[in-house]
């Protein structure tokens, strides 16, 4: 069944008469369109894609099951025409992606009631099909290649930003279209910052180095973290690395359909707490990935929803000690029928360069 048909079935089940999709990620998911300008109006029976003259040919080639409409004036004028032709009484809109100004314009122009909705398309995006998983795997292979190559580049005196830029270049060289987020390279005491985006700090002998990075490939992301050392980082940081590695392995063992995000988060959290570092693990254990680097399901204390086959999640516990350093280790997992498959293969043991 096409994605449009799946969306229309959900709309019928939830008694949604029509919806306008404006989120670029949801638009891509629903239609396959990869351009930067457009929106879609989907009713229970029809699907319209509106874009300007720059993208009409692209939209015609990429979207399946949509009627393509070219807007020459404001795009909402075409939405108004669709509403009038289809006699739409209530138009749902994605409240998380419409600005207040955008809502004002819709309210002033559109001859129907407006109904804010949230998470409709996102709930479908949580479950990946085989082609999506294959694309994520391809993005991960690019990321793993870059990691293995960067090990030859890191030496005393090289700055964090130089390492980050090199990683980004290596991924693009292998076909990545961009990075999933600003590459994190945090060395020495800065490794105690969970999101220590690369700085001008020079990497020194004895530094622990956390590298958290990923790429976009054909619209889908990878997200990987490894913590390595330049020389010997000292006993405490080596001990912390081992605890994080063990916590991470326990999550890999436990991830399967039926376990909730909250329960899976507790697997890592309870182990780290048991080892005496509970207060040093302040972020969630993981999150979903796909068209965006942070999607549902969340692997955190707030998520009581059971995981299902087709979820793709990160597993990334960490320990961070101010003025000492920190460790995070991250894999991407796909939930299978009776367990999970780790999409990553690069070693997680402590590499001492």
Image: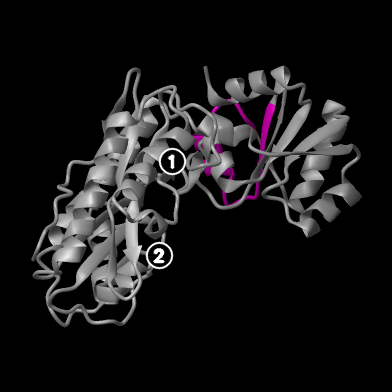
Does any portion of residue 51 appear in the rendered image? yes
**From where the camera sits, is residue 214 visible?**
no
Which image quadrant for residue 240? bottom left
With 201 as the anchor, is 33 left or right in this view? Answer: right
Q: Quadrant of the C terminus?
A: bottom left
The residue identified by callout 1 is 290
Q: Residue at x 38, y 70 (%)?
A: 197
Q: CA distance from mark 1 to mark 2?
A: 20 Å
Q: Relative to 148, is 330 on the left or the right?
A: right
In percent of width and height, residue 169 lies at 26, 64
Q: Is residue 65 magenta?
A: yes
Question: Going 89% across and 37% down the picture, which residue do you hit?
Answer: 113
Give percent across and percent down for residue 112: 89, 37
Please name the residue shown 39% across and 55% down the image.
281
Q: Is residue 213 placed above or below 90 in the rendered structure?
A: below
Q: Give the label, 1 or 2, closer to the camera.
A: 2
- Identify the mark at residue 195; answer none if there is no mark: 2
> Of marks 1 and 2, which one's residue comes earlier in the chain?
2
Q: Quadrant of residue 350?
A: bottom left
Residue 225, x across and y down, in percent: 28, 54
Q: Which residues are magenta?
A: 47-67
The colour scheme used here is one colour
């Amino acid at each position: 069944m096409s994605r449009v048909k799946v969306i229309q079935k959900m709309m019928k089940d939830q008694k949604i008469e029509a919806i306008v999709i404006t989120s670029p990620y949801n638009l891509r998911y629903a239609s396959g369109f990869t351009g930067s300008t457009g929106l879609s109006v989907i009713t229970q029976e029809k699907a319209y894609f509106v874009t300007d003259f720059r993208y009409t040919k692209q939209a015609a080639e990429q979207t399946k099951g949509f009627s393509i409409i070219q807007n020459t004036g404001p795009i909402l004028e075409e939405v108004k025409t669709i509403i009038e032709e289809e006699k739409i009484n209530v138009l749902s809109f994605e409240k998380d992606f419409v600005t207040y100004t955008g809502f004002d314009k819709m309210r002033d122009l559109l001859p129907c009631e407006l109904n804010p909705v949230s998470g409709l398309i996102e709930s479908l995006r949580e479950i990946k099909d085989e082609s999506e998983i294959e694309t994520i795997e391809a993005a991960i292979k690019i990321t793993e290649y870059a990691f293995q190559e960067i090990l030859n580049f890191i030496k005393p005196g090289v700055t964090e930003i130089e390492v980050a830029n090199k990683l980004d270049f290596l991924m693009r060289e292998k076909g990545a279209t961009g990075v999933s987020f600003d590459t994190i390279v945090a060395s020495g005491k800065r490794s105690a910052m969970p999101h220590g985006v690369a700085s001008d700090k020079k990497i020194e002998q004895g530094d622990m180095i956390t590298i958290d990075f990923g790429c976009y490939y054909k619209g889908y992301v990878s997200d990987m973290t490894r913590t390595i050392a330049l020389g010997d980082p000292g006993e405490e940081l080596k001990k912390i690395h081992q605890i994080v590695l063990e916590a991470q392995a326990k999550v890999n063992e436990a991830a399967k359909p039926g376990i909730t995000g909250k329960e899976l988060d507790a697997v890592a959290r309870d182990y780290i707490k048991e080892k005496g570092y509970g207060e040093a693990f302040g972020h969630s254990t993981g999150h979903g990935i796909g068209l965006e680097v942070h999607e549902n399901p969340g692997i955190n204390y707030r998520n009581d929803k059971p995981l299902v086959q087709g979820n793709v999640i990160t597993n990334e516990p960490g320990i961070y000690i101010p003025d000492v350093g920190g460790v995070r280790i991250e894999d991407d997992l796909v939930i299978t029928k009776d367990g999970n498959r780790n999409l990553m293969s690069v070693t997680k043991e402590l590499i001492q360069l």
